[in-house]
Every structure is written in C-alpha cells, then in structure tokens.
Amino acid sequence: MQAIHEPLETGAITAQRFQTLCEKKGVTWEVHWFWRERRRDGRLLLRREDGRAVFSREYARSTSLWTGGDRYLRGMRTGSPRHLAFRAAVEFLENN
C-alpha cells in the first residue's frame, strides 16, 4: 500500500503566510548562520516583542553555494530544508 502525500505549498505561499502571521501575532524573526562541519546551516528564531525566543528550528543548507536566495525569504525553494523549517514555523504560529 502506498502512502498518499499531500502536495507542498510553494515557497512563495509559505513566505507570504509566514510574514502575515508574524505581523498578526507580533513576533519578529531572524536567521542565524553557523558552520557545521564543512557546511553552513541556518537557525530560524521567532521572538516576542519582549525579546524572548518562542520558536527555534535548525535546518541544513540544501546547497554548499552561497546564493542571493539565502538573503531573501521569497527565494526559498519548495521542499528545501529551509522551506520545511519555515512551514514548521507557520504551523507553530497558527496553533499558538
């Protein structure tokens, strides 16, 4: 029996939902880059207005090349580890 997988929403839709929820909930977000072995990974943080972190998710970079897409939220590829981290943040914001 094969599992039925729901299609992923695109990176652009996730980015739009994420930004809307952040504004609605009054949280700020930031990405910190760090080295893990030979690659540079990211950590997504959501903070409340008082500066307290309420969500954190680490993700592996999907490529070893540093590209312009790393700087912009709308540049994430659908299904990439970065996209999945932001989807998890959207789910967190929707449920809290």
Image (cartoon, helix red, strand yellow):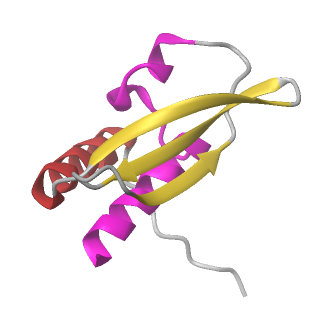
The residue shown at (47%, 11%) is 68
The residue shown at (51%, 51%) is 85
Q: Quadrant of the N terminus?
A: bottom right
Is 44 situated above or below 67? Answer: below
Q: Which residues are magenta?
A: 67-96
Is 4 situated above or below 45? Answer: below
How many numbered circles does the render carry? 0
Q: Quadrant of the C terminus?
A: bottom left
Instruction: Using residue 17 as the reference point, say whether residue 82 is left or right of it.
Output: right
Instruction: Using residue 62 as the reference point, say whether residue 79 is left or right of it.
Output: left
Is 69 situated above or below 42? Answer: above
Residue 80 shows in this picture: no
- The spot of residue 45 in percent (x, y) is 45, 47
Furthest residue in direction left, as rendered: 24
Instruction: Using residue 54 as the reference point, say whether residue 33 is left or right of it.
Output: right
The residue shown at (68%, 29%) is 34
- The spot of residue 26 in percent (x, y) is 16, 54
Residue 55 shows in this picture: yes
Residue 69: within the magenta? yes
Foreground pick, 96 / 19 = 96
Quadrant assignment, res 25? bottom left
Furthest residue in direction front, as rendered: 50
Foreground pick, 51 / 17 = 51
Residue 87: within the magenta? yes
The kind of secondary structure the magenta stretch mainly shows is helix
- The spot of residue 22 in percent (x, y) is 22, 51
The residue shown at (21%, 51%) is 49
- The spot of residue 3 in percent (x, y) is 64, 80
Foreground pick, 39 / 69 = 39
Is 46 situated above or below 67? Answer: below
